[in-house]
Each structure stands twice: as C-alpha cells, then as structure tokens.
Amino acid sequence: MKAPEIVGIEPQNWFNSRPLTLKQLRGKIVLLDFWTYSCINCLRTLPALKEMWRKYQDKDVVIIGIHTPEFEFERDLSNVRKAVKKQGLEYPIASDPERFNWDNYGNQYWPRAALISADGEIIMEHVGESGYDEIEQKIIAELKKMGKLNSGTPLHEEKHYHHPEISPEIYAGSSRNEGLGSRQVCTAKGCEEYYDPGKHRRNVIYLQGDWKQYAEYLEFREEKGYILLPYFAREVKVVLSGTGLAEVLWNDKPLGKYAGKDIAMKNNKSYVKIDGSDLYHLIQNEEFQEGIVKIIPFSRMKVYAFTFG
C-alpha cells in the first residue's frame, strides 16, 4: 500500500526540521509515529524512538513524530514545543492539530506507527506501546536490502507488565466518563455542588464541593473540596491543568515513600506543582495494590484523565 503523503501541517508546526514530505524522502526509510504528549502509552515509546534515531539517522532512516492531540490543550503549539523540549526529542516532530494525517492513515489509537519503505510503501503498521523492537528488526532488514547496513542488533525493549486487574484509563469529562460516584446537591449557594457519599467503588470518580463537568474535563470552582478515585495499580498519573499547588493523598495519608516523581513534600504534606496542561506522576508503589488517590485542588484546576501503570 502506498503511504499517504504528509499534508496540512504549517511550516511553524515543524520542530527540529524544515517541513518534510514523503516525496522528498523517497529513497529513505521513514517511520511515522503518531503520538500526543499527555498520553502515557506514547511517552513509554519515546526511549525506543530516541535510541533508533541515534542509531540510524545517518543511514537513510527518518523518524517523524506526528503529534496528534487527544485533548484541546494539545492543539496549542506552545504546549507541544514545551513537551518536545521536556522529552528531549531531536528527530523531526510535526504538530497536526486538525488531525489531517491521523485521519488519512485511519488511526484510532495512540500510539500508532507506520513504517514506510524507500519506495514509499507501507511495510509495517503497529499499534500500542510495546513492540518497537520488532519495528527496529524490520528497519534493520530493510537497511540490509539497501546495502546500508551489514549487521545490526535491535534494542532490548523492557516489556511493560499489564496486570489483568489493573485499573483502566478513566476520563473525567462527560464525553468519555462512564458515571461519577457523587451526586449534585443543593446548598445555600445553589444546586451545583457534589457530595461524596462515603462508600466507594473501584474505578469510579468521586467529588466533594463545587465542580463543573465539561466534555473533556472536570473543573474545580471554589476553595474547599476534593476529587478521589479508588484504583488497583502500581502507579498513578493524572492529566491536569492550571497553575498552583494541589495536595495529594494516598488512603487519606501523605504519600511518603509512595510519592511519584512530580510530588514534593512540605510540612509533612505531599503536593504536586501544576504548571500548565500535562501528565503528572503522583503515586508510585513497588507492587500492584488497591488504593485511593485523593487530590485537594485549587480554584479552576482542571482534571482530564487518570492513567495507571
């Protein structure tokens, strides 16, 4: 199958490269990697992609990351620029906020990769975060055919164990949330506050206080309240937006040894510093176990999704 051309990306939406087309790259092997910066599955593939770029960029192999937003804030070019720098990506990145190329390639999932031969044919497609060692094996085979490589050893990809009971990705916005565990109640302020019933089920979001649910996210409106979620996993990451400090608890206690890399301790309390729209690593356990993550937000903080590992 002939690979669809890269289309619809403005010159300013290219990072680490001038605008590229597959026609210009004919004679080279091209790996298109469809990703977005707040997707944990995508982020787990970046070490493999960076390693392949280091090994093959001078051997007629071009990697192009097609950044395709899942959430509205990922359409913002400044957010993408910040993410490219934060992740240390040096291969070409094309920001495609309108999803033109995502649609042309029939994509439905993040991440998604398409390997294109030197004559412009799709020779391998791949969905999901693992299996990039298999992509490299195919690249090595193609380079040998082209006489560009005599031998090569694919990267050793660490397999990510998927526990059968691990909590799924849980979205906060109304368009993909399957139901909140809290009901709205009437107070002197009106009938827009949520009440935590106190009994909780795994993988259900519970709210306390003045929240408003939009299609993509939940937004906290006032000074007192929280959001909590019972889960089963080793680690918890949350897509958050805003600017400020939010306290984070595990089973109603400061995180301590369970603190993820984005947690700071202050006065025996655990906080996440939110600085823009991104994926934040809150909890890290050594073993899979049940727990309840609770976030005490600041005004106008937004919660998009919980992801687990």
Image (cartoon, rainbow, N blue to C red):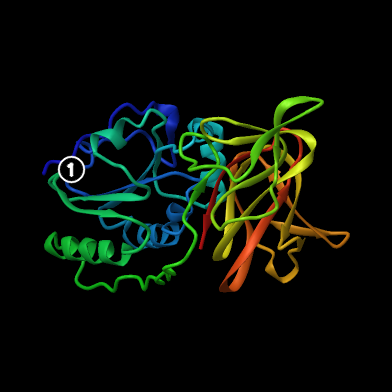
Q: Position of residue 180 (x, y in %)?
A: 57, 43
Quadrant containing the N terminus is top left
Q: Nearer the viewer, residue 62 or 246?
A: 246
Q: Position of residue 111 (x, y in %)?
A: 37, 50
Quadrant of residue 92 within the rendered picture = top left
Question: Residue at (45%, 50%) from the top-left corner?
Answer: 90
> Mark 1 = which residue?
26
Amino acid, disc 1: Arg
Crowd class of label 1 (few under 14; some 14 to 19; many from 20; radius 10 Å): some
State the residue lying farthest toward the right: 267
**Whether residue 148 can be seen here:** no
Q: Is residue 150 above or below residue 98?
A: below
Left or right placement of residue 149 versus residue 62 in this view: left
Left or right placement of residue 128 versus residue 170 in this view: left
**Whether residue 251 can be seen here:** yes
Left or right placement of residue 149 versus residue 63 in this view: left
Q: Nearer the viewer, residue 264 or 20?
A: 264
Question: Residue at (26%, 65%) from the top-left corner?
Answer: 134
Q: Position of residue 100 (x, y in %)?
A: 31, 30
Helix, strand or loop under label 1: loop
Q: Is residue 65 above or below residue 54?
A: above
Total numbered labels: 1
Q: Nearer the viewer, residue 17 or 122?
A: 122
